[in-house]
Amino acid sequence: MIYNSSIKWDAVYDVIVVGFGGAGASAARFAADNGANVLLLDSAPEGSEGGNTRYSGGAFAWGNNFEKLRNYYRQTYYPFNYDSKDLDTFVENVIKMKEYSKKYFGIDAKATGRRPNGEYPEYKDADAMQSQSMTQGMYNGGFWKLLRKKVFERLDKINIWFESPAIHLVQDANNKTVLGVQVKRKNQIRNVAARNGIVLSCGGFENNPEMVQNFLGQGSLAPIGTLYNQGKGIDLAVEVGARLWHMSNYDSHGLSLRQDQPHEKFAYMINWKSLFNGSIFIASDDGTRYFREDEEDRHGYKYNHGNWIMIPNQNHPHIVMDQRQYNQLKNDQSAKAAQIKELISYAIKADTISELAEKINALKLSEAVADFNFLTDDVKRDMFLNRKIETMRSFSEGPYYAIPVRHNILHTHGGAKRNEKCEVIDLEGNPIPHLYEAGELGDIFATKYIGANSIADLLISGKISGENAALPKPKTVELDAVTGASKVPELKSDARTEITNFTAEENQGIGMSENGISDTALVVRVTKDGNKISNVEVLQEKESPSIGGKAIPKLVKEVLCKQSADVDAISGATTTSSAFKDAVAQAISNIK
């Protein structure tokens, strides 16, 4: 959107950060620490902000040998090119990540112990990169809460607007300076100016089917993180003449259940070793096998003739098994037993393989089962896909089962090309004035993602972009606001402190837990009528509305039905479930 003198600014800030995920939280924090008055925008409603960081494990990359670490990363780019300045800056900062944790969070990071030989141990110096964590446990929202807390400690310098998507960037036609952002705020279009800089930190495009088809060449992928990464950052960058890079790169964790839901169940199932062990394989659209089922997951990348590539996407694959395997999984005793038992409950059943093939539209399924049996009974080696033969058993008597699955997607890496200062680069290779970028949107990973590096990158790029965006810039046009943000209710910050004044009458107890996915404590009030739990009220919660928010009413019903806090966790919302049960148990113990 080209600036003209008829544009009236509704508010003016020093820095605007577009996207309140991990990178945006970091950028806003460091911009504020460098004296900037910051506006932090997010398209998600409060409780769903956080981007993919909210769903991440929270581990970050670290190493202590620059040359070895750099060499390891260089190999993961093969056969793609890389920018040496960008890579060197990233590696230099990865080496400082433990000091970063101590200096900016007051935490001594600890090694996670995961993959001590590297995600690609075949590469030289693969053990130069190790995973570190600032929090206990993984995938529990702990890391996101640390970042969010740092933002909320600076609300005197940071305003937050939820449900306020950026529509356009406003750019000076003469010198290409990005002056501000047009925002849809409470059903009104608002023009907000930035004196010194704008940071794009609005994530990838995994929830934009058109972009997934155009840039990734895939037809059906199930997001396993945020549902709000819809590629708007790509549109904003293109609008102001940015060069794109890394658009074909994304990562995954294999398969999820296929029910055509925004969030499918059972992500990460490819890692369930007890699942793919026996008379079971994954059938492609035509019923044939197409990848090694027992191979260790490398964020979706699978071995392919000396390289590792993303699994070729199928549109309606299935996990296929016989009755013996079904019984084996029904009686599974592994750590994933509960999930496996629920998973097989979605199976399609048929008396014969040919009948099953017809039901799931897999014309070559009978041939694939015959080939599988030939490998296990006669060849005693999987000469096609190299699955370990000890994990394979011939199909025997029916009935037979097929579970519909989808390939999933964790996040994309494409976006505007950025330099080592996190400045966005135009088509001529020059920085676009006042425009910066951080996080998954346009990160430096061209191909083969290595776990823990997106967390390292969001911390590194968030800090660099926030500090550089905060640097005072020469005034190019008049940016005084016509109105003042503080005078218009719609332009005030959405950030507010949590409720803390809770009361309980006789036969009531208050309980709270800070271990949910949100930084805000989950608070409940339990009422008893004699020895019976008669009511469970949720007084405060900011869990993700699409996941934890939907799980809480179900958990309330379960507690009332079982008359106990010891109820089963809701699948897909285990962190919220655990926090809710802890709060209810505490409330029961506090009843007078």
Image (cartoon, rainbow, N blue to C red):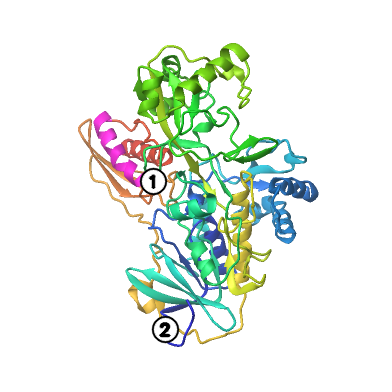
Residue that label 1 marks: 262
Magenta span includes 54: no
Please name the amino acid that badge 1 sits on.
Pro
Q: CA distance from mark 1 to mark 2?
A: 39 Å
Residue that label 2 marks: 8
Count of residue discs = 2
Residue 421 placement, left or right of 337:
right
Q: Residue at x 58, y 73 (%)?
A: 35
Indicate the secondary structure of the residue bearing disc 1.
loop
Mark in front: 1 vs 2: 1
Residue 345 position within the rendered picture, expressed as x and y whole percent measured from the top left: 36, 26
- The residue at the far right in this view is 67
Magenta range: 548-563
Indicate the secondary structure of the residue bearing disc 2.
loop
- The residue at the far left in this view is 529
**Which of the 4 quarters of the picture holds residue 256?**
top left
Q: Residue at x 57, y 85 (%)?
A: 476
Please name the amino acid that badge 2 sits on.
Lys
Q: Is residue 523 above or below residue 567?
A: below
Magenta span includes 554: yes
State which quarter of the image contains the C terminus: top left
